[in-house]
Image (tube, rainbow, N blue to C red):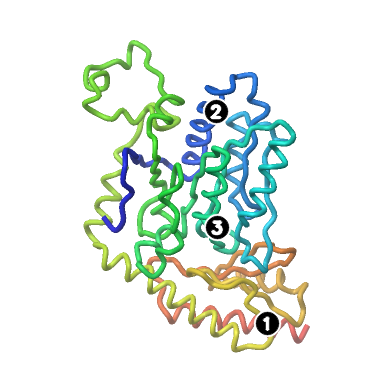
Amino acid sequence: MVTSLSGTGGGVIQNTTSEAVLVTLVAARDRALGVHGIDFLSKLAVYASDQTHSTFSKACRIAGINPANIRSLPTSVEGGFALSPAVLRSAVEEDLAAGLIPLYLCTTVGTTSTTAVDPIGALADVARDYGVWVHVDCAYGGSACICPEFRHHLNGVDLVDSVSLSPHKWLLSYLDCCCLWVKQPGSLVRALSTNPEYLKNKPSESSSVVDFKDWQVGTGRRFKSLRLWLVMRSYGLANLQSHIRSDVRMARMFERLVRSDPRFEVTVPRLFSLVCFRFVPKRRANRRLLDWVNGTGRAFMTHTVAGGKFMLRFAVGATLTEERHVLAAWKLIKEGADGLERS
């Protein structure tokens, strides 16, 4: 084990982060309704930053959370698009004053748009003051934390209620594979357990085995752990760390190349292996540049909009990516920029 969380917590492999967020949200919901009563469902309020993955809002809809009580809290480019504890506390206080019940906070280590990292410890401290369930979505960024130099991004994780990490993002594993850890597994079981007569059996009833049907949406499940175990056994910790560090090193190289060309700007500080940047001379040409690069079939990039800016996203993470691929991609991007300047 690279790290460990002490106590009575437990883990299970879900399909995706979507399911991990959903089942923990349902567990938090039922825990709160057990205290306040089912009639207070419409009073439950949930929180996340405006950079949180869309799976959060989808899970809220499925769990029956009042759409008016889903808080998408603002972030800023100055704050690295991370959620501010002060902003969270202000939102919770406003909801309490309005007669709502603060329920659930979804934090992120490595947001989809810019790989921003929320300050887990500080946010968990705020949430604890109000009895709010804290979930950490580190689907992408959590993989980097197998390397000691990135582990500080998880500071405060011992204070949260649940954590999910997706090895299929960056740990050479298969889709779909999301590892969910919960501090109090009983919360999941109480919310998700169904035991009709045809499912009853001696091992489950005697608690000699863990019946994972009570930790997930579905009843059946595949033997997912075998494939993840094979990756870990085949590569080992050192090689997995080398894979992460290699991608980060190549992203750092690409970042330097972008900064070396005055026509471009790095729009967000790079934390992992994603570089967000823009073509400066013709700001409205960034989408055209993106379409041109992707249209060549020689490289593929995506975009995002954060802080009101349209950004290009260059992600290093493919299993077989080498420096020559990064250099070739940068040459292609410059070629496209040259063409835009002439047009």
Q: Which residue is mark 1?
A: 337
> Which amino acid does the dot numbered 1 rest on?
Ala
- Observer-nearest residue: 151 or 237? 151
Q: Which residue is mark 3?
A: 118
Give the Cα separation between the discs numbered 1 and 3: 34 Å
Residue 290 falls in which quadrant of the image?
Answer: bottom right
Give the Cα separation between the discs numbered 3 and 2: 25 Å
- Mark 3 or mark 2, which has the lower sequence index? 2
> Which amino acid does the dot numbered 2 rest on?
Ala
**Number of callouts:** 3
Seen at 52% across and 60% down, the residue is: 110
Q: Position of residue 307 (x, y in %)?
A: 71, 64
Seen at 33% across and 48% down, the residue is: 5
Q: Residues within 10 Å of mark 2 (few under 14, many from 20)?
A: many
Q: Residues within 10 Å of mark 3 (few under 14, many from 20)?
A: many
Q: Quadrant of the C terminus?
A: bottom right
Under circle 3, the secondary element is loop
Q: Residues within 10 Å of mark 1 (few under 14, many from 20)?
A: many
- Marks 3 and 2: CB-CB under 8 Å? no
Q: Which mark is residue 32?
A: 2
> Which amino acid does the dot numbered 3 rest on?
Asp
Q: Quadrant of the N terminus?
A: bottom left
Q: Position of residue 254 (x, y in %)?
A: 52, 80
- Observer-nearest residue: 287 or 54? 54
